[in-house]
Image (cartoon, rainbow, N blue to C red):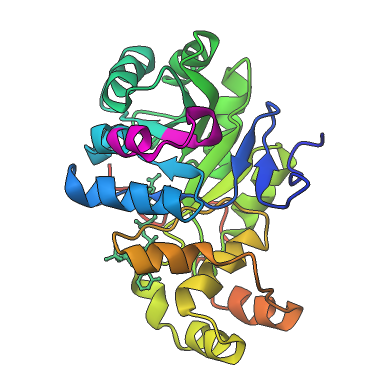
Amino acid sequence: MTTGALTADGRARILNDGNQIPLLGLGVWQMSDGRECIDAVRWALEFGYRHIDTAQAYGNEESVGTALLASGVPRDDVFLTTKFFPRNRDPVAALEQSLRRLRVDHVDLYIIHWPEGGATWAWPGMERARELGYARSVGVSNFSATQLEEVIGAGSIPPAVNQVQFSSLHYRRALLEACQRRGVTLEAYSPLGTGRHLANQTVRQVAQRLGRTPAQVLVRWCVQRDVPVIPKSTHRQRIEENADIFSFHLSDEDMLELDALDETDGTDRALEHAWW
Ligand code: NDP
């Protein structure tokens, strides 16, 4: 198996540690703990999602665990991500608490949520979490190309994933290339611009031409770049709609038109402004 390649069914990507990440996942940021999050995860699993993205900072790991247990979908069939909240000091202790809330014995991916306090200090703890079997893969989020180099230089293993804000309107081409050069899988968060990109005229025109929705076009744009992507919705019908992205294709012209929407100037940075 080649790192960065897709699996035979084209639905998952092979990470640099040999594990596989499904290209489509459900993001659960800004879902309240309880019924809203439980329902969304339950519906997603029903519609075939096998990848859920939560975080210690989201305050809804318990609901993700409840939905997973209730779904009847075997634990091993679901790729579960959580993120280390970097205002805590110890990634291992924080993950032990996440596992308790999620009611699982490991997560599939554990990532540093953002590089607060520097790119490298938390990495030894992340590696330790992996050695202990608490996380199958470990990675980072919101890391620029420079920060990625720093953590790779400092660690015994490289991050498997760098999860960043990425879409046709935030097409961080140089960051994508930096990840590719280092065998790190770039994963796209906010693929719909937290909803804002859905009104974009070009996105709407491409969608209309193809008889698809703007959300499907934006998610498909990521998938067609072999980039794992985690759209969020709390609505059953939208969760279903966002998953129907393997039955159509964007032409080279469509892709070029969408690529041209980039507002980041092809940057190698993960964010225009840090929030920490
Ligand atoms: P998205 O870009 O996925 O957009 C979600 C918004 O779009 C919501 O308002 C949702 O509304 C709406 N929406 C979703 N599908 C449709 C549809 N088919 N039609 C119309 N509206 C739709 O937002 P996020 O910023 O939440 O990013 C996705 C995930 O990425 C997060 O949930 C989180 O898991 C991850 N993330 C990670 C970050 C990090 O720092 N690592 C930062 C930000 C996000 P509604 O829910 O009402 O349906």
Give the quadrant of the C terminus.
top left
Q: Residue at x 46, y 62 (%)?
A: 191
Q: Residue at x 42, y 67 (%)?
A: 192
Question: Foreground residue, 271 or 128?
Answer: 128
- Say whether residue 194 is visible: no
With respect to residue 190, does 262 lie above or below?
below
Q: What is the x, y in percent for residue 255?
A: 67, 75
Give the quadrant of the N terminus.
top right
With respect to residue 53, does 69 lie above or below?
above
Identity of the residue furthest to the front in this view: 72
| Horizontal relation, residue 65 to residue 32: left or right | right
Q: What is the x, y in percent for residue 161?
A: 57, 37
Q: Residue at x 51, y 52 (%)?
A: 48
Q: Is residue 75 magenta?
A: yes
Image quadrant assignment for residue 67: top left
Image quadrant assignment for residue 165: bottom left
Identity of the residue furthest to the right in this view: 1
Q: What is the x, y in percent for residue 12?
A: 65, 46
With respect to residue 60, does 119 lie above or below?
above
Image quadrant assignment for residue 232: bottom left
| Horizontal relation, residue 242 to residue 9: left or right | left
Q: Residue at x 69, y 74 (%)?
A: 249
Give the residues in magenta: 66-81
Identity of the residue furthest to the top in this view: 132
Q: How many marks?
A: 0
Q: Is residue 72 magenta?
A: yes
* View quadrant of ligand 1: bottom left
- Say whether residue 226 is visible: yes
Q: What is the x, y in percent for residue 99?
A: 34, 20
